[in-house]
Amino acid sequence: MGDAKTERQQADDLPGGNVIRILLQQHAHIRDLFSNVKKTRGDERQQWFDKLRATLAVHETAEEMILRPVAKRTAGEAEVEARNLEEKFASETLAELETMDVDSAEFDTKFAYFERAVIKHAEREEQQEFPAVLAGCDQDQLRTMGYHLQSVLSMAPTHPHPKVAGSTTAQWVMGPFASLLDRAKDAVEASRSRH
């Protein structure tokens, strides 16, 4: 995972609808969001962090529900367990960051650490998990996974839920309920900010 530009170029080399193309595009977008959080302050920074938080929560849920079951077969159980543990840790850290003042020194320190961990996690996915999935699936399977991933992205929770993070089964069982609560919470917060 060199940078957002490289990820977008790698994504462009894959057919439309391919699950790995979609995930690479999301990785690039996540990098952009990290950058926006770091270069802003105050309300603008909070808005960018909220977008990053929602994007990461949705992205990780979708990976756990759609990518990991296939990666278990193509990349191996140890690879999947390692990525899921990283995602559980990221969810816990994101939940902590969500409670902090985005302009505090404590937030800056934890956010920098969090960004490094997320980027390292994405690099491992791109170097180990994605190639195995690409090699182990035909184009129809990759498109079908992409379709399912897009469906999950539109319904996944928008806040971190560390108790279900890292478990495909827990995401399928609890994810829909968490998503309803998160999206209702987001709507109330958006309504408050307009008034």
Image: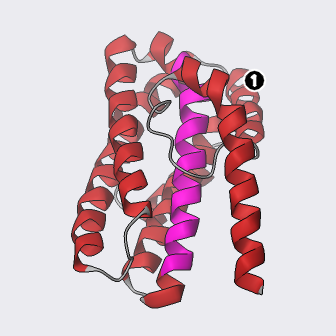
Instruction: Give the SS element for disc 1.
Output: helix
Whole-percent x, y for residue 184 in the image: 75, 55
Indicate left or right for 13 with 121 as reference. right
Indicate left or right for 158 with 78 as reference. right
Q: Residue at x 73, y 73 (%)?
A: 190
Which region shows up in magenta?
46-69
Question: In the image, what residue type sits under mark 1?
Answer: Asp
Q: Residue at x 50, y 47 (%)?
A: 160
How many marks can you see? 1
In front: 82, or 41? Answer: 41
Q: Residue at x 21, y 69 (%)?
A: 109
Residue 12's place in the image compared with 70, above or below, is: below
Whole-percent x, y for residue 141 in the image: 70, 21
Residue 164 visible, this angle: yes
Secondary structure mainly formed by the magenta segment: helix
In front: 145, or 84? Answer: 84
Indicate left or right for 12 with 152 as reference. left
Q: Answer few, some or many: residues within 10 Å of disc 1's Cα (few below 14, many 20 plus, some between 14 and 19).
A: few
Residue 13 visible, this angle: no
Whole-percent x, y for residue 93 in the image: 34, 51
In front: 12, or 153? Answer: 153
Whole-percent x, y for residue 143 in the image: 74, 31
Residue 60 is inside the magenta segment: yes
Indicate left or right for 122 with 189 as reference. left
Q: Quadrant of residue 136?
A: top right
Q: Quadrant of residue 75?
A: top left
Which of the image's four quarters has the C terminus? bottom right
Q: Which residue is mark 1?
A: 140
Residue 140's place in the image compared with 51, above or below, is: above
